[in-house]
Image: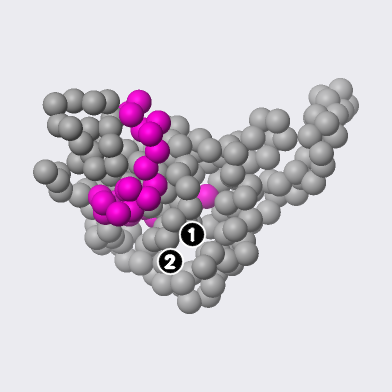
Amino acid sequence: MAGKKLTELRALVHGIETAMFTTRRADGHLVSRPMVTLDAAPGADFWFVTALGSDKLAELARDAHVNLAYYRDRTKEWVSISGTAKLTQNRPKLRRLYRPAWNAWFPEGSDPRHGTADDPRMVLIGVKAHAALYVRSDKPAPLAALELLRGYVTGETPQVGALKQVAARELHGPRHGKRGAAKARRASASGAPPRSARTPRRTR
């Protein structure tokens, strides 16, 4: 069961849908790309889908640490989530999270499974949140807009909402938070990603 803070984060990003998903390239530089956040499901805090062989999978195989950034222009709320990713082609999980709109990224081909929930090209990325920063507006959207306008006119920093920080133990409890942090430290020290973040083999 998700903790209260994790539930709040999910509620905050609900409706934004698209996250800027950041990974680390082989040369050490960071790269971000927009990815649609899938419905909540057991096994990870946030789920995404991508295609087998994509660059992001190679990047995650080298370093499983990721960042998810969300921004709601209407209210100026934003969320930044740091965590670790795991990869899976678990078919029941894919069928549970599947959306017909995925056809845009997995067009039909010679394989009759293409574009369906059984498409062998589909890979799920599950992200377990380690910590988060976010600003949640404490004003209705019209008042938030007026606050921004006031800041523009006066030069003062708009007070849309308070900056809040959430640690791992608040998201998953002390035991899970320590376990996740220890695993991340071991992976970083060894230079190898967690086993769950390694690129899945192509299925037939």
Name the quadrant containing residue 144: top right
Amino acid type, callout 2: Ala
Task: Tell me the crowding category of disc 1: few under 14, some 14 to 19, or many 20 or more residues within 10 angstroms, Cα based.
Answer: many
Q: Give above or below for 187 relative to 48.
A: below
Q: Give above or below for 75 relative to 131.
A: above
Q: Residue visible at 60% across and 53% down?
A: 9
In the drawing, does residue 21 fall left or right of residue 121?
right
Name the quadrant containing residue 155: top right
Quickly name the residue at label 1. 130
Amino acid type, callout 1: His
Name the quadrant containing residue 147: top right
Quadrant in which the C terminus appears: top left
Q: Earlier in the sequence, mark 1 or mark 2?
A: 1
The furthest residue to the bottom: 175
Q: Residue visible at 33% across and 48% down?
A: 95
In the drawing, does residue 157 fall left or right of residue 32?
right
Which dot marks residue 181?
2
Q: Which residues are magenta?
A: 81-105
Q: x and y percent of residue 39 in the render?
A: 47, 47
Whether pointer 1 and pointer 2 mark residues with C-beta atoms closer than 8 Å, the reply is yes
In the drawing, does residue 56 fall left or right of residue 36?
left
Q: x and y percent of residue 43 in the render?
A: 39, 61
Q: Nearer the viewer, residue 87 or 154?
A: 87
Q: Residue visible at 68% across and 40% down?
A: 77
- What kind of element bears circle 1? strand
- What kind of element bears circle 2? helix
Residue 80 visible in the displayed image: yes
